[in-house]
Image: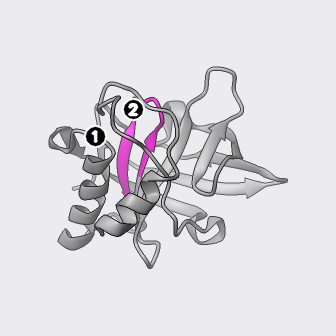
Amino acid sequence: MLATALLCASCAVERGGAYRDAAAPMGVTTRFDAARFAGSWMLWESFGPAAPGSFVFEERNGVLQISGPAALDLAGDYRNGAPGEFVAKAPNGETLVVMWVDEDFETAAIGTVSGSFGAILDRDGFVPPDRAQAARDIMEFYGWDVRTLERTVL
């Protein structure tokens, strides 16, 4: 796990934000695969206020679209940056990073580069303790204050 975290740190992007330490690095997972990541994800835990429900990631005509009731301000069109990095096309949009995803693409840790939003997503809304801990560990490594994560799925 630590080796993966250190390897991911080499994929560093910008820093900062309300829910994470601006001095910490932030990077993308090295196992990202757009085809396996596509589809619907349930918002399981997040930082700050969030709408329960799903995020939907889909590519249409070369443009990544994020939608769903939980997407809120992150809904919209994105272009691909590094694998696992989604750069908003809107002028004031946020860059969203997939920091970690498990081997089966069932659970993921995502967050904005600014640190204004971070979350743990899951395909079916039930995250086993080992995957929940792995997601929190990687988020903590990237400077997120995981003590402030709030459950959005019961």
Q: Secondary structure at mark 2?
A: loop
Residue range corresponding to the magenta coloring: 110-121
Report the front residue among 68 and 136.
136
In percent of width and height, residue 33 lies at 60, 68
Q: Residue extending furthest bottom?
A: 104
Q: Which residue is mark 2?
A: 115
Q: Amino acid at mark 1?
A: Trp
Q: Which residue is mark 1?
A: 144
In percent of width and height, residue 45 lies at 28, 49
Report the front residue among 136 and 38.
136
First in residue order: circle 1 vs circle 2:
2
Classify residue 128 as left or right of residue 18. Answer: left
Q: Is residue 69 magenta?
A: no
In percent of width and height, residue 111 lies at 43, 43
**Residue drawn at the location 53% of the way across and 42% of the way down:** 96
Task: State the CA–CA distance, disc 1 to disc 2.
Answer: 8 Å
Classify residue 71 as left or right of residue 100. Answer: right
